Amino acid sequence: MDLKSIKNLISIFENSQLGEMEVESGENGESLRVVLKRNSASAAVQVASVAVPAAAPVAEPAPQLKAETGPSEGVLDYNLVSDIKSPMVGVFYSAPSPESEPFVTRGTKVKKGDTLCIIEAMKLMNEVVAERDGEIVEVLPKSGELVEFGQVLFRIF
């Protein structure tokens, strides 16, 4: 893992809502472990890297998500994918009207503040917006479905 890759991981981590991220890489008989943690008081990023001997037992890899489209055109690691959850109970709408195209679909690149969907609660239409820049990896509910508070609506890379 080179310095550019580590800087990229830090950038992704800073733009995410993750509290902690751990990445292990093994190249040329040596292993490198990078641990990123958010300081709860100031939300600053702490970086710690530890060299691990090549013969050390390796933990099972994190679950991976196969994506048809994505920034790396292949397998995405769940550690780099964050969830966008429903802020309330209501009916999920993927488009502003039944005749309109959805706000986002798999592969849509979004910027912080872009509208992702609408949740209708008590006859009020509430927009759910992107909390960070990224790419939509998965849209979980179907338009018109009832969603619960905290239910995952989207996965974003």
Image: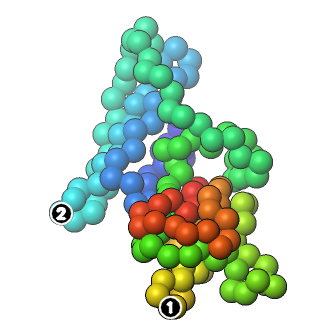
Question: For the C terminus, which image quadrant?
Answer: bottom right
Q: Is residue 92 left or right of residue 34?
A: right
Residue furthest to the top:
55
Q: Which mark is residue 41?
A: 2
**Residue 53 visible in the displayed image:** yes
In-front residue for pair 87/52: 87
Residue 13 sits in which quadrant? bottom left
Amino acid beneath label 1:
Leu
Q: In this view, does 156 lie above or below 57?
A: below
Q: In this view, does 90 lie above or below 109?
A: below
Residue visible at 69% across and 53% down in the picture: 71
Residue 95 sits in which quadrant? bottom right
The alpha-carbon separation of the residues under discs 1 and 2 comes to 35 Å
Residue visible at 71% across and 46% down in the picture: 67
Q: Which mark is residue 124?
A: 1
**Kind of element beneath mark 1:** strand
Q: Where is residue 143 in the image (x, y as percent from the top left)?
A: 67, 71
Total marks drawn?
A: 2
Amino acid beneath label 2:
Ala
Residue visible at 33% across and 29% down in the picture: 50
The answer to the question of whether label 1 and label 2 lie on touching residues, with beta carbons closer than 8 A, is no
Q: Is residue 44 left or right of residue 6?
A: left
* Label 2 environment density (alpha carbons within 10 Å; few <14, some 14–19, many ≥20): few
Q: Is residue 100 left or right of residue 103?
A: right
Q: In this view, does 61 lie above or below 12?
A: above
